[in-house]
Amino acid sequence: PQGGFACDFGSTAVVWGPGSRPIVGNDADQLAAAEVEARLSVYADFARKQAEHPELADAVLLETPPLLGVRQTRFVEGEYKLTAEDAIQGRRFEDVVAISSCPIIAYYGYRRYLEHEGYDIPYRCLVPQKVENLLVAGRCISSEQQPYESHRAMAPIMAIGQAAGTAAALACRQKVSPRKLDVGLLQQTLAHQGAELRR
């Protein structure tokens, strides 16, 4: 978020922020420029906080991350594209492999909290349209921007990763491409592993 926020660990504080301007996350020139801007911004923000808060006069900046955290770049075009309506309405799918109930976040603005128990992430979002023997997991699954802001959080990302890894193992065992995998078997295996699929 703009301005950042902090966690206090006794004599050390970890600060997230200040935010960076939007860039194309897979453009090397934009990334390099944003790295420089972000570091200058951190030092300026630190100096401003010291000027505003006398108790920070002896504080020192210990370190900054080695790289800028890129939130998103590309999404795969999958067998199904998760839509904003799917997330907002709490849509359920027969081929569910993960669930997200995290709010939809509009950086740097408001959070739209979901008014239901969550929405399903279908297996088809992990299966690219025109590439065989490939599954995707994490932030790049087939999705519109709004649901991405929800399912990019840690809990759904872990569930999506578990589904993709399990699907890959099953596809190898069954000697089929991920596209032809029996989704019922995948769901049964995930449920046996403790995954919550609301089935």
Image (cartoon, grey):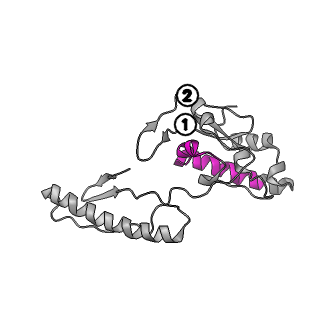
x and y, in percent, of residue 146 in the image: 55, 42
User: Mostly what secondary structure, the magenta segment?
Assistant: helix
Residue 64 visible in the displayed image: no
Q: Are marks 1 and 2 in contact (CB under 8 Å)?
A: yes
- Which region is colored magenta? 143-169
Residue at 57 percent of width and 46 percent of height: 145
Instruction: Name the residue type under label 1.
Output: Ser
Quadrant for residue 53, please give it.
Answer: bottom left
Left or right of 179 in this view: 165: left
- Return the residue nearer the eye: 120 or 155: 120
| Image height of 58 relative to 109, above or below | below
Secondary structure type for disc 2: loop
Say which residue label 2 marks. Answer: 116
x and y, in percent, of residue 47 in the image: 22, 63
Instruction: Name the residue type under label 2.
Output: His
x and y, in percent, of residue 175 in the image: 86, 56
At label 2, counting other C-alpha atoms closer than 10 Å, the crowd grade (few under 14, some 14-19, many 20 or more) is few
x and y, in percent, of residue 129 in the image: 77, 52
Secondary structure type for disc 1: loop
Q: Name the residue at the top extreme.
A: 115
Say which residue label 1 marks. Answer: 101
Find residue 160 and name its label: none
